[in-house]
């Protein structure tokens, strides 16, 4: 009998969203007359904008002709998309099209990138965290054992973020090889200024670490001093890989398109101390294991950058932003301490004194009939916090706040 990759047995089952679904179903069964408002899951709700749909329709017609048919495309993405990304998202930042790798999702990219690192690499993550960074390293054998008492893996470096440090992670005491950063952050909705991000870039340079920067929520930034890309920080092009996605920007969660930026100036070391270009390694990995995102989808993604597309997408983002504002300000009025919700679709609130994240979940569901996500599901430092999202309708956001105020306000 063959043996399996034992690292998988080291994964902790995530009961988060299945437990939420079960609790909601149970409540709904016992209270069929109650209208439950779901502000839990991080999926968008607005339809794909017309400019993008038109571009995809055109591409569909094109591949149905003898002249326009497309077979396998370039694994790294079509030039037309890589160019338009470089010219728009990285204008003035010196990122070249051949440093951009188009994919079918930032989740896969974040998970796949670990192929490039030694199995002994030390990994640093923020706590709470988007679980993909952690679990893919557990699968890769870099985590050590899970400690049930602390809720942490032995060999992972956790950088806690909470109201105590204003959600700015501190530089780790043990030097990591790989540092995951996600800003605007999921789940906390908080951001880093350029100066705060620069500390990490300088640290990575000094300690010869690499930063994996997840900018999936970049489109939600509205404050001027908040960097959209890590490459706005001087020196980042030598130490950072950036992930972006059309999922939250343009509602592509079901359409699927994203990209990774791997600058040609990022090097890692071989055991014989030779400098190896990560751009070359990622290119090799991509061409070996991936046959490219669909032509139709890439034409859709290209239209995100057209004048019409940009305008239409802006409107959707504004809609979610307005919801975030309604939720954030409503909660504050009701007496809650609230973080995020300005440069992010996520609102991260402190649960009332004396309750755990899950206890608050139960109260919110039973008394206000509103569903959110318990912070403790994202890591031990998320305990005492709770995530609401602005991806619902405006009507539901208003109604949710009305109910929450009625139950918890004053
Ligand atoms: C939604 C999200 C992504 C995007 O994932 P896709 O696979 O591109 O849909 C990436 N990172 C974070 C933190 C996210 O929340």
Image (spheres, rainbow, N blue to C red):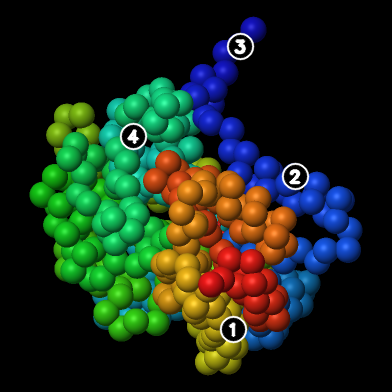
Check whether the beta carbons of the residues at disc 3 and disc 2 lie within 8 A of each other: no
Distance between the Cα atoms at labels 2 and 4?
Answer: 31 Å
Residue count near mark 4 (Cα–Cα under 10 Å), binned few <14, some 14–19, many ≥20: many
Give the image quarter of residue 400.
Answer: bottom right
The first of marks 4 and 1 along the sequence is 4
Distance between the Cα atoms at labels 3 and 1?
Answer: 53 Å
* 221 up-or-down from 23: above or below: below
Could you say which disc has been placed on residue 2 in the image? 3
Could you say which disc has been placed on residue 22 in the image? 2
* 336 up-or-down from 164: above or below: below
Distance between the Cα atoms at labels 4 and 1?
Answer: 38 Å
The first of marks 3 and 2 along the sequence is 3
Distance between the Cα atoms at labels 3 and 2?
Answer: 36 Å
Residue count near mark 2 (Cα–Cα under 10 Å), binned few <14, some 14–19, many ≥20: few
**Residue drawn at x 47%, y 74% as measured from the top left:** 332
Residue count near mark 3 (Cα–Cα under 10 Å), binned few <14, some 14–19, many ≥20: few
Residue wearing tag 1: 319
């Amino acid at each position: 009998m063959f043996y399996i990759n034992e690292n998988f047995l080291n994964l902790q089952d995530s009961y988060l969203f299945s437990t939420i679904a079960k609790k909601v179903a149970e409540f709904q069964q016992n209270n069929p007359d109650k209208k439950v408002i779901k502000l839990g899951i991080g999926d968008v709700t607005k339809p794909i904008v017309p400019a993008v749909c038109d571009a995809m329709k055109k591409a569909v017609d094109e591949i149905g002709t003898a002249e326009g048919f497309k077979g396998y495309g370039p694994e790294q993405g079509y030039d037309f998309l890589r160019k338009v990304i470089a010219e728009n998202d990285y204008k003035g930042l010196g990122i070249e099209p051949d440093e951009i790798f188009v994919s079918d999702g930032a989740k896969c990219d974040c998970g796949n990138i670990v192929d490039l690192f030694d199995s002994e690499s030390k990994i640093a993550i923020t706590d709470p965290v988007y679980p993909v960074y952690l679990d893919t390293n557990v699968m890769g054998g870099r985590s050590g054992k899970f400690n049930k008492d602390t809720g942490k893996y032995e060999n992972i470096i956790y950088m806690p973020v909470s109201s105590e440090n204003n959600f700015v992670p501190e530089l780790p005491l043990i030097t990591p090889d790989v540092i995951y950063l996600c800003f605007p952050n999921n789940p906390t909705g908080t951001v880093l200024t350029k100066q705060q991000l620069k500390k990490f870039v300088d640290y990575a340079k000094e300690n010869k670490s690499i930063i994996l920067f997840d900018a999936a929520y970049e489109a939600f930034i509205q404050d001027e001093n908040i960097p959209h890309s890590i490459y706005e920080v001087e020196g980042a092009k030598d130490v950072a890989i950036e992930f972006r996605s059309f999922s939250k920007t343009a509602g592509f969660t079901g359409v699927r398109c994203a990209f990774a930026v791997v600058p040609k100036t990022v090097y890692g070391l071989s055991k014989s101390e030779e400098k190896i270009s990560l751009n070359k390694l990622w290119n090799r990995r991509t061409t070996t294991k991936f046959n490219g995102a669909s032509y139709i989808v890439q034409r859709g993604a290209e239209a995100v950058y057209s004048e019409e597309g940009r305008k239409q997408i802006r409107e959707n983002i504004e809609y979610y932003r307005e919801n975030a504002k309604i939720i954030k300000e409503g909660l504050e009025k009701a007496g809650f301490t609230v973080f995020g919700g300005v440069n992010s679709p996520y609102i991260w609130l402190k649960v009332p004194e004396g309750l755990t994240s899950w206890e608050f979940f139960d109260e919110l569901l039973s008394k206000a009939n509103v569903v959110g996500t318990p912070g403790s599901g994202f890591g031990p430092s998320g305990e005492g916090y709770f995530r609401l999202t602005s991806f619902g309708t405006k009507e539901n956001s208003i109604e949710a706040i009305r109910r929450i105020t009625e139950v918890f306000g004053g």
